[in-house]
Image: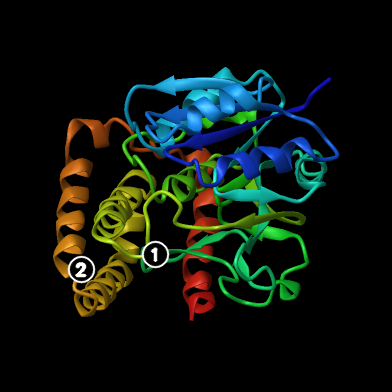
Amino acid sequence: MTKTTVVIPNYNGIQYIDECLHSLCQGTRMPEIILVDNGSGDGSRELVREKYKEVQVIEFAQNTGFSSAVNAGIRAAVTEYVILLNNDTVVDREFVENLEKALSEEPGAFSAGAKMLQMAAPERLDGAGDLYCALGWAFSRGKDRPCEAYDRPCRIFSACAGAAIYRRQAFDRIGFFDENHFAYLEDTDIGYRANIYGYYNIYAPTAKVYHAGSAVSGSRHNDFKVGLSARNSIYLVYKNMPFLQMVLNLPFLLAGFLIKLLFFCKKGMGGAYLKGLVAGIRLSAGKKGRSHRVKFSFSHLKNYVWIQGQLWVNMVRRF
């Protein structure tokens, strides 16, 4: 019986999707595959329908965002596990098998993130799990470093949703990806939420994937990504931190936002960053934002203590 469904969100991914699906089909473990198309107009959806009959295609008329797309795929999955995979990736033959193994050996884990290698320079890491710190920054662990330095499994703050496996049943308890995010930081948000609820997230270095990067949004920094990431960084804090934790971290958060503002001003994107911060405040203050705020429970107090420790420790790790 198939244990895993791979969900691939796709938006105009004609350059990558064929190679991505081919690599999955050549693996040691054949999963169910769902492609969720976000209104592509480049023929990628038609290519998949014609060449990969075994792939279930869910179509949206327009781009509804990453979170909405993967939620549709997760809800359609009937397997024990769900792997989320970017369309601009090529997976190792044992990718699915090793992710299944990692999660099956950790019954308390919500997710396991793969070892993501840079497609253009596979000796370098694209990421070995995600970390989040009190400055309000989420960042990829090991980014641009030699891949052999990250061969040990470990606990991480959250898994990068570009290549990670999730326990399907846990979504029914903690909720699905927050569609207010549209894209960016949605994986940090759900990993944060899993930590609050007492799950944990792990890094699975034996599951390897090669990632092109910026396949949809373009360059590493652009006005769209900068503005949306800034908006979501405010919203992430508001919805997951209880009031006292926000007060405790306020000096660090203000410093973090100021540093980012200065950084993007130097790149000519300070206006986009500021607009994003304002949009994040408006989203958090509005009905849509307030309805998604995680309610504090004393039963989760020890989990908040662990999270706070990680927020401080990860500031050191960031530098």
Question: Residue 26: which quarter of the image?
Answer: top right
Q: Which mark is residue 294?
A: none
Please give the name of the residue rendered at 37% of the width and 32% of the height, measured from the top-left corner: 41
Kindly tell me whether residue 303 is visible in this rendering.
Answer: yes
Across and down, in percent, residue 307 comes to: 51, 57
Instruction: Give amino acid for label 1.
Output: Arg
Tell me the crowding category of disc 2: few under 14, some 14 to 19, or many 20 or more residues within 10 angstroms, Cα based. Answer: some
**Residue depicted at 50% across the width and 25% down the height:** 46
With 198 as the anchor, is 22 left or right in this view?
A: right
SS state under label 2: loop
CB atoms of marks 2 and 1 within 8 Å:
no
Q: Nearer the viewer, residue 86 or 300?
A: 86
- Seen from the viewer's position, the closer of residues 128 and 92 is 92
How packed mark 1 is, by other alpha carbons closer than 10 Å (few <14, some 14-19, many 20 or more), is few
For disc 2, the marked residue is: 269
Q: How far apart are the two marked residues, 2 and 1, measured between alpha carbons? A: 13 Å
What percent of the width, then of the height, locates residue 297?
Answer: 45, 38
Tag count: 2
Residue 4, above or below 274: above
* Position of residue 274 measured from the top left corner of the image (x, y, whole percent): 16, 62
What residue lies at 14% left-to-right and 57% top-to-bottom?
A: 275
Whether residue 133 sits left or right of residue 105 in the image: it is left
Which image quarter is the N terminus in? top right
Estimate the x, y position of residue 210 in percent, counting from the top left. Answer: 65, 57
The kind of residue tagged 2 is: Met
Q: SS class of the residue under badge 1?
A: loop
Task: Give whichever of discs 2 and 1 has the lower sequence position.
Answer: 1
Say which of 52 and 303 sits in front.
52
Query: On the image, numbered disc 1 is attached to which residue?
Result: 220
